[in-house]
């Protein structure tokens, strides 16, 4: 089941004897988070489908493949649903892999959960702590070894946190998972975590570090490009610390930060950074969409749809990244686009388009329906002429003919959208009224403060009891004629677009960029530090080494941004906005953007499959044709065009030597496409006149082109005479 099983044995030394200790894990089946509230009021988040498979199956499959032998699943709210699901699944019958549920009705936080587990006395040694909404394919071997070796040398080394590089978008200071920018101070030699700050802990764009932290650690590295994977390897002392400190509730904001500032006990936390492996947690709608795309694009292999076959259904992978279940009925005129998933038993009508979307099992989709970027769960009925864009549609929803879901909408279980009704962008719709008292947005939140809703869920033992909600329905529905459900009012101060499955709109990015520009003005006035916590070097700074390092980082970020635009089919204008925000963040000029973007395009052309020089040139043609408009927006004067030629020279000599014999051909192509002008090429040649011969390789190679350019105006004059 799941990925191939690795060795589950783990040994520890005790009086020179090898004693086998089973590797254990604590899985926190948290149910309520504010961002998922319309859905998790009725069902635990770990049972929500992620690419048509309940989230908890991804976590358990990974734990089994990583060598864990015993998992304790802790659950509180909706505990019966979680326990019933596990009992009916195959997890309780796996050889050499034990799943045990622990239920507590009084726990309202991760801290409470770990205190209950400590009281049960079930943990025998080091353990993995993870939430049931985490997807990973990493190997635990190296991280466990590092943790064990550190513990031998230092008994105070009680936790190892798994992190991964994930640069945030500088415009909105948010990762692609929708999580806020995190600052970590790490000892580069020992990998000890020295400071941990998230957005909730600083204001006005400043970051404060204690003087003692700088004094006691001669070597310190400050990062804002790390993603917390929420996978922790813990020593048994962690459970004891939670028991001794009842104010520890949140794993990060209370426990981690509490240990980092505690000088008395001296406990230490370390980090293990993964690079090629995958690890991500689904804790908002944007991360739900991002992780879903990563699964479909097979970054999570072997946790992919055609391998994660649970129950009696089988999913097959077809060309262009299309996954299909069994017994699908699809009209010949219907179109299913690349990187889409269609669940078993689903029916698709005539002239319907399904693009970059996931459709669950036993759905009925009518004719002339347009679905793009959506996540549609099981048993959904979508009648003729409906339009859905970048939305989530839960089990049992009915959309009557002609109705529309605008980007960012979320329809909870069994909602009915009336005929031709338009659900506005970022709306959250449920059969339940919005709770008057909102819970806090903690990492784990088990108990619901709304007793009426909790009793309704308990009465139905996890299934939605429609008969008990008749009194809640308003005959004059908020969802049009024949509609059933409540549109929840937006919370004051909440920016729904930040955590939506919908792409971030141009106007929102422009607002964020303007905010950065304002902050940079304050920086140049000397009033504050940059919002990222970085110290931006003065333009008169003559430290070449520092400038080179900054340029390297900037080039890498532009390349990563460009590749994301390619893979996620981001529009030209959005790519330009993201590069502009990087330009502001790194204090760069337009020529730097031109060179970095051109490098990213040409590097991608080399990385694309090609079998000859002609096919490589064809790759260049394809890339530049599609993205020329973005590149030309940074080529308004001669200096910027010369920077592109110099960058191309650099690539031919170092990172992409395949281009070297094609330099002149591609330079001529750039001229024909009006990417670089004649004056730029001639000025480039003029700059090389006094250079060493080793620096004139490509100028010499391009002499025929240069001479042609010099002579072309004279020929034009002759023709006029």
Image (tube, rainbow, N blue to C red):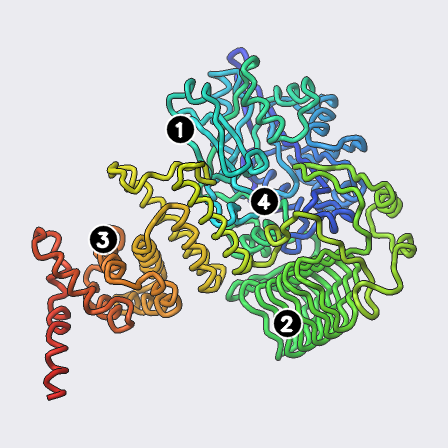
Name the residue that disc number 2 marks. 370
Q: In which quarter of the image is residue 110?
A: top right
Asked if the residues shown at circle 3 and circle 4 are in contact, with their CB atoms under 8 angstroms apart, the answer is: no
Q: Position of residue 112 (x, y in %)?
A: 72, 28
SS at badge 2: strand
Q: Camera-side residue: 239 or 82? A: 239
Quadrant of the drawing holding the C terminus: bottom left
Q: Camera-side residue: 24 or 457? A: 457
Q: How crowded is mark 3: few (under 14 residues within 10 Å), some or many (20 or more)?
A: some
User: Considering only order in the chain, which callout, 4 or 1, is on the residue closer to the N terminus?
Assistant: 4
Q: Where is residue 519 in the image (x, y as percent from the top left)?
A: 46, 44
Name the residue that disc number 1 marks. 188
Residue 18 to residue 563: above or below: above
Q: Position of residue 581 (x, y in %)?
A: 43, 52
Name the residue that disc number 3 marks. 650
Residue 550 to residue 243: above or below: below
Residue 507: give its label: none
Name the residue that disc number 4 marks. 135
Q: How crowded is mark 1: few (under 14 residues within 10 Å), some or many (20 or more)?
A: few
Q: How far apart are marks 2 and 4 (CA)?
A: 30 Å
């Amino acid at each position: 089941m799941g990925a191939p099983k690795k060795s589950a044995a783990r040994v520890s030394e005790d009086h020179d004897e090898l004693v086998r200790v089973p590797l254990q894990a604590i899985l926190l089946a948290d149910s309520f988070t504010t961002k998922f509230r319309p859905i998790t009021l009725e069902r635990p988040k770990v049972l929500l489908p992620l690419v048509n498979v309940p989230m908890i199956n991804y976590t358990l499959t990974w734990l089994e493949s990583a060598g864990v032998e015993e998992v304790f699943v802790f659950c509180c709210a909706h505990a019966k649903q979680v326990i019933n699901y596990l009992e009916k699944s195959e997890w309780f019958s796996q050889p050499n892999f034990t799943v045990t549920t622990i239920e507590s009705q009084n726990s309202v936080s991760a801290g409470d959960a770990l205190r209950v587990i400590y009281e049960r006395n079930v943990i025998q040694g080091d353990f993995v702590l993870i939430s049931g909404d985490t997807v990973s394919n990493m190997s635990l071997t190296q991280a466990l070894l590092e943790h064990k070796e550190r513990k031998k040398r230092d008994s105070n080394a009680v936790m190892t946190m798994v992190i991964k590089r994930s640069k945030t978008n500088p415009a909105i200071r948010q990762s692609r998972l929708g999580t806020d920018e995190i600052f970590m101070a790490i000892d580069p030699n020992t990998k000890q975590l020295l400071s941990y700050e998230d957005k909730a802990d600083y204001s006005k764009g400043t970051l404060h570090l204690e003087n003692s932290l700088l004094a006691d650690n001669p070597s310190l590295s400050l990062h804002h490009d790390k993603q917390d994977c929420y996978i922790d390897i813990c020593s048994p002392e962690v459970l004891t610390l939670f028991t001794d400190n009842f104010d520890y509730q949140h794993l990060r904001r209370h426990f981690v930060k509490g240990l980092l500032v505690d000088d008395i006990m001296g406990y230490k936390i370390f980090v293990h950074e993964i690079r090629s492996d995958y690890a991500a947690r689904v804790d908002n709608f944007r991360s739900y969409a991002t992780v879903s795309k990563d699964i479909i694009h097979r970054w999570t292999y072997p946790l992919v749809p055609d391998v994660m076959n649970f129950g009696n259904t089988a999913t097959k992978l077809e060309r262009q990244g299309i996954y299909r279940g069994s017994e699908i009925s699809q009209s010949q005129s219907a179109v299913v686009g690349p990187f889409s998933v269609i669940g078993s038993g689903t029916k698709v009508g005539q002239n319907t388009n399904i693009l970059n979307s996931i459709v669950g099992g036993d759905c009925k989709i009518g004719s002339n329906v347009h679905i793009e970027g959506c996540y549609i769960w099981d048993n959904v009925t979508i009648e003729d002429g409906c339009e859905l864009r970048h939305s989530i549609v839960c089990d049992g929803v009915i959309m009557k003919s002609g109705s529309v879901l605008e980007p960012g909408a979320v329809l909870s279980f069994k909602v009915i959208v009336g005929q031709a009704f338009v659900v506005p962008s970022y709306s959250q719709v449920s059969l339940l009224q919005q709770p008057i008292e909102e819970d806090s947005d903690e990492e784990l939140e088990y108990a619901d403060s709304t007793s009426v809703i909790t009793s309704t869920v308990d009465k139905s033992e996890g299934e939605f009891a429609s008969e008990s909600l008749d009194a809640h329905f308003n005959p004059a529905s908020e969802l049009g004629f024949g509609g059933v459900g409540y549109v929840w009012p937006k919370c004051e101060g909440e920016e729904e677009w930040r955590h939506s499955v919908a792409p971030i709109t141009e106007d929102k990015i422009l607002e964020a960029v303007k905010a950065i520009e304002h902050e940079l003005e304050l920086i140049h006035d000397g009033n504050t530090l940059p919002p990222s916590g970085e110290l931006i070097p003065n333009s008169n700074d003559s430290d070449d080494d520092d400038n080179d390092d900054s340029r390297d980082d900037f080039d890498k970020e532009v390349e990563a941004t460009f590749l994301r635009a390619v893979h996620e089919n981001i529009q030209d204008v959005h790519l330009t906005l993201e590069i502009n925000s990087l330009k502001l963040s790194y204090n760069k000029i337009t020529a730097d953007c031109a060179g970095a973007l051109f490098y990213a395009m040409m590097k991608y052309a080399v990385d694309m499959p090609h079998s000859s020089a002609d096919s490589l040139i064809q790759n260049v043609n394809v890339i530049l044709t599609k993205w020329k408009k973005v590149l030309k927006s940074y080529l308004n004067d001669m200096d910027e065009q010369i920077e592109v030629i110099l960058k191309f020279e650099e690539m031919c000599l170092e990172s992409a030597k395949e281009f070297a014999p094609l330099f002149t051909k591609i330079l001529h192509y750039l001229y024909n496409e009006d990417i670089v002008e004649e004056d730029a090429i001639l000025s480039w040649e003029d700059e090389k006149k006094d250079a060493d011969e080793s620096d004139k390789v490509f100028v010499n190679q391009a002499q025929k082109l240069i001479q042609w350019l010099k002579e072309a105006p004279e020929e034009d004059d002759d023709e006029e005479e």
